[in-house]
Amino acid sequence: MPDPVSGFSLNLISNHVSGLLDGIAPRLVTIHGRRRGTSSGFLWRPGLVITAEEALEADDDITVMRPDGSKVTASLVGRDPSTDIALLRTEEEPSDEIAFSPTDGLRAGHLVLAAGRQLEGPSAALGIVSLTGAAWKSLRGGHIDRRIHLDLRLDFQSEGGVALDTSGKVLGMAVFGPRRRALVIPSETIERVAPQLLEKGRVARGYLGLGLQPIRIDQAAADTAGLSEPRGLIVVSLDQDGPGQSAGIRQGDILVRWNNDTLPSVRRVFRLLGPESVGQAVDLGILRAGEHITLAVEIRERPAPQ
């Protein structure tokens, strides 16, 4: 026979989790920003919605379905692919600014509720934190303040919703990471990025003004440059008056070092050109006609898209 004590405890847990969803439901919205299907978002401030940047396939034709089922048109305030955060503006609705909770006390094994909103109503997925770690760089070079992996099945329509702890505090935004692993963009990252999107529409990133492609180089040239592997990045194009051209870089040059670090991939350069790189001076190691030279480049802020 079932243990009545255990059954009673499970009922308490079940009702508590359901109550957590009820508590956050008035903050959850459905985002129609995909050609196929929907995603979730949440009210950050009156008239401002945060959602997953990855889920927005376009900058226009975005509709938000409110918790009461009404639909309003939304405009894109800004998006940051590197941290997977997008900010939308809708018609004003009375609401307090959402209260985020710090994630430094979160540990593997803690229960987390991922809450979103689908067309039929609020959605929930309960799981545990499978991994926590220090700050990390996303594949697109964004600074994520804490690594938080979730062991739960996140529905595509729930991406962009919130992650709650067992007291109902908002830890961040539930999104998909590499290999469709459920991750949390932590509250600290959102609180840093969202105000920048509200002010400027984007997050500043570094800019070299170079078009690069990976290339294998001659072993003798690699030995001359002190490289453990014969790889570099060839300059295939230069932006006029960009930092690279101003520093004397030429088309056909092969970049092999960023200060003391090797450059095995274009992705590596992209990750080095984070917000903190703007204004920095970098020594770029270059192979030119078999000769190894070093050029100092001052990184500028990437121009806004025209």
Image (spheres, rainbow, N blue to C red):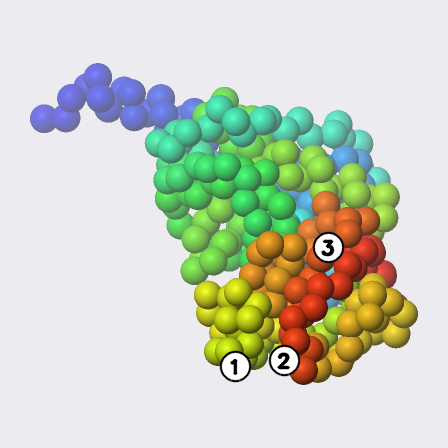
Q: Residue at x 58, y 56 (%)?
A: 261
Q: Residue at x 82, y 70 (%)?
A: 248
Give how far across and how far down residue 164 sits, in percent. 52, 32
Q: Mark 3 points at which residue?
A: 282
- Residue most toward the left? 1
Q: Quadrant of the N terminus?
A: top left
Three-letter code, disc 2:
Gly
Three-letter code, disc 3:
Val
Q: Looking at the picture, tell me which residue is in the foreground, 210 or 293.
A: 293
Q: Is mark 3 on a helix, strand or loop?
A: strand
Q: Alpha-carbon distance for marks 2 and 3?
A: 22 Å
Q: Which of marks 1 and 2 is in front?
A: 2
Q: Are marks 1 and 2 in contact (CB under 8 Å)?
A: yes
State left or right for residue 97 relative to residue 229. right
In primary-sequence order, the first of circles 1 and 2 is 1
Q: Nearer the viewer, mark 1 or mark 3?
A: 1
Q: Mark 2 points at which residue?
A: 290
Q: Name the residue under label 1.
A: 218
User: Does residue 31 appear anywhere in the picture?
Assistant: no
